[in-house]
Image (tube, grey):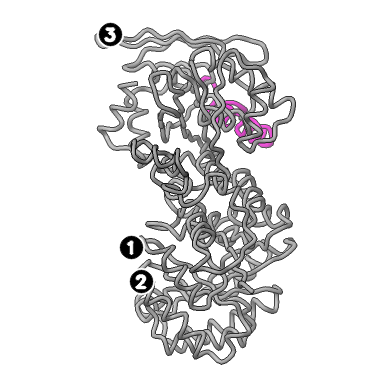
């Protein structure tokens, strides 16, 4: 009988540590629920002691998710372990995951600790964690560069102290499949009580070998694999869950294992991560990239028409991607639209279907043909929408290469229209200044991304913005065939989230609801120089990019 593999997902912990992938509590909960649908066995929800926000996220996920084990990472310190346990103790299946470095390099330069001292601390802290939590995982950080005799000794001792799972990480992505397989084999053969614990592997991708090393670890006897959606994580990232599981599914001749994961949810899960974080999926990304099941070469197309197996080693349906294309346009009815959305894997409520169909009709009036990617973009921009505090009524832009751009923007709030006119060196910048003047709330534009959702001249433009004020960071998303309109929808989505938080904060504090710490009479419109300075200070753009971003659009 094939052995079962435990899928341990650390997207919300190791993955979120990657620059650009941070999420707030609501976003983490949404993603954790999708991971539950995906069928992962363990969700590492965060590093509870890292911050109050991390603790709150881990605790919320532990309370909300019933179908997965919920783990929190902790250093091998009593205060860390106590905090991790407090965060996960409400989970249906809690786990405390504690670690300490074991390589001489880390012991000497990072921990400034002897092997013997690290050994004693590992054992003591595993025992402490086991007294609190029914399930404990121990990780030997930098195990792939640890002396094998010492590693065997540590593994034996922590199992004896109560660790049911022992993780062997390739923390810096240094090892190779042959070496890593040999390390796992040595542990399986030399540790007397190895049968009393589950051996796990956690591989980083610094040399592009994370998935290969993980598979080698499984072949050598490991039965838990730690990975992330899209392979995100520190530096070059972790083993990608979609690549690892589809390698097992596709090559049963080499990897005779079973798993609980529902591969048909992989594409949707990857898209959700991209939607939440604003980081696009690379077109050539294995399994879930836009080109993974695309064929342009005439020879390839001919082979595909004869037999899809000539150029596809797995089916698009196996990851939740549909191959049939139903052409939708302005003459299509709501039934056909709803059916296509259901074929793409979305279950729409009547209210949601009506709203999205209206958005679809607006796009269909401007495009000859609506593709699946257009529909997915509409779905992602239309669901989990921001509160409708300010709504776009209309805008008029006057711009040219030998003139200063002018924007007249009209917004609605509570049925009342408010209008402002601003001038700037680009139409988008002028619109953004006009919005700021209307809402009278200072904000910093942290990021602005514009990309085409589909091909051709009438493609939908998708705009992602990130703004910040004294209370936090807020993301917005907008799609339209008009990039200025998409920019406005994206900004207003972020602005409305900002205003909602600000007004709640001011209401509880008794302060001014709309100005994030400033009084209305003190509000000063953000100048072009100040906005450029703020963007530069955020670390997201350089001078030349700032000029292109703000002045050119």
Residue 422 visible in this rendered orientation of the protein:
yes
Q: Mark yes or no: residue 511 visible.
A: no
Q: Secondary structure at mark 2?
A: loop
Q: CA distance from mark 1 to mark 2?
A: 9 Å
The quarter of the rendered structure image containing the N terminus is bottom right
Q: Is residue 498 magenta?
A: yes
| Range drawn in magenta | 496-521
Sequence-wise first label, 2 or 3: 2
Residues tagged 1 and 2 counted as in contact (Cβ below 8 A) = yes
Element type at mark 3:
loop
Judging by the rendered image, the residue that carries numbered circle 3 is 403
**Principal SS element in the magenta part?**
helix
Please report the residue visible at 37 percent of the width from the left and 77 percent of the height from the top: 179
Question: Which comes before the other along the chain, label 3 or label 1?
Answer: 1
Q: Is residue 295 left or right of residue 15?
A: left
Q: Which mark is residue 247?
A: none
**Residue 470 percent coordinates (x, y):** 51, 37
Residue in front for this viewpoint, 306 or 248 = 306
Q: CA distance from mark 3 to mark 1?
A: 50 Å
Residue 426 image position (x, y, % from top left): 34, 17
Any magenta on residue 21? Answer: no
Check disc 2 and report the residue beneath it. 176
Q: Position of residue 30 (x, y in %)?
A: 63, 45
> Gap in Å between the C-alphas at discs 2 and 3?
59 Å
* Residue corresponding to mark 1: 207
Q: Quadrant of residue 224?
A: bottom right
Disc 2 residue crowd, few under 14, some 14–19, many 20+, Cα 10 Å: some
Q: Is residue 358 left or right of residue 308?
A: right
């Amino acid at each position: 009988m094939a052995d079962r593999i435990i899928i341990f997902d650390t997207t919300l912990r190791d993955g979120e540590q990657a620059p650009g992938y941070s999420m707030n509590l609501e976003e983490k909960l949404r993603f954790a629920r999708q991971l539950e649908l995906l069928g992962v066995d363990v969700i590492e929800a965060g590093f509870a002691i890292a911050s109050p926000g991390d603790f709150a996220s881990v605790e919320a996920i532990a309370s909300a998710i019933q179908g997965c084990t919920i783990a929190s990472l902790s250093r091998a310190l009593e205060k860390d372990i106590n905090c991790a346990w407090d965060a996960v103790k409400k989970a249906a299946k809690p786990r405390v995951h504690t670690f300490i470095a074991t390589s001489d390099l880390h012991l000497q330069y990072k921990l400034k600790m002897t092997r013997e001292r690290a050994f004693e601390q590992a054992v003591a802290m595993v025992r402490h964690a086991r007294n609190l939590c029914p399930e404990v995982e121990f990780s030997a950080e930098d195990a792939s560069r640890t002396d094998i005799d010492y590693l065997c000794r540590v593994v034996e001792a922590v199992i004896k102290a109560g660790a049911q799972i022992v993780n062997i990480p390739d923390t810096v992505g240094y090892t190779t499949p042959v070496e890593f397989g040999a390390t796992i084999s040595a542990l399986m053969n030399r540790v007397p009580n190895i049968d009393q614990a589950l051996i796990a592997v956690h591989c980083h991708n610094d040399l592009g070998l994370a998935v290969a090393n993980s598979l080698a670890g499984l072949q050598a006897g490991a039965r838990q694999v730690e990975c992330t959606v899209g392979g995100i994580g520190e530096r070059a990232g972790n083993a990608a869950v979609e690549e690892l599981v589809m390698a097992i599914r596709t090559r049963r001749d080499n990897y005779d294992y079973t798993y609980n994961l529902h591969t048909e949810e992989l594409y949707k899960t990857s898209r959700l991560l991209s939607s939440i974080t604003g980081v696009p999926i690379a077109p050539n990304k294995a399994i879930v990239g836009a080109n993974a099941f695309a064929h342009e070469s005439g020879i390839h197309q001919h082979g595909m028409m004869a037999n899809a197996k000539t150029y596809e080693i797995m089916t698009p349906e196996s990851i939740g991607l549909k191959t049939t294309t139903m052409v939708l346009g302005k003459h299509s009815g709501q039934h056909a639209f709803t059916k296509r959305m259901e074929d793409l894997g979305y279950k729409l409520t009547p209210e949601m279907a009506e709203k999205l169909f209206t958005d679809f009709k607006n796009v269909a009036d401007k495009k000859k043909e609506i593709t699946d990617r257009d529909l997915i973009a509409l779905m992602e921009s239309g669901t989990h929408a921001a509160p409708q505090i300010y709504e776009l009524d209309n805008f008029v832009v006057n711009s040219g290469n030998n003139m200063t751009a002018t924007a007249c923007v009209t917004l609605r709030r509570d049925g009342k229209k408010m209008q402002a006119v601003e001038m700037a060196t680009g139409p988008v910048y002028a619109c953004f200044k006009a919005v700021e003047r209307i809402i009278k709330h200072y904000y910093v534009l942290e990021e602005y991304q514009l990309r085409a959702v589909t091909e051709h001249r009438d493609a939908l433009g998708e705009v992602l913005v990130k703004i910040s004020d004294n209370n936090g960071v807020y993301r917005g998303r907008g799609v339209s065939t008009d990039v200025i309109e998409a920019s406005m929808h994206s900004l207003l989505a972020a602005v409305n989230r900002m205003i909602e938080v600000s007004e709640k904060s001011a209401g509880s504090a008794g302060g001014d609801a709309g100005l994030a710490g400033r009084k209305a009479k003190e509000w000063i419109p953000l100048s072009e120089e100040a906005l450029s300075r703020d963007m530069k200070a955020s670390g997201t753009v350089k001078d030349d990019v700032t000029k292109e971003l703000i002045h050119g659009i």
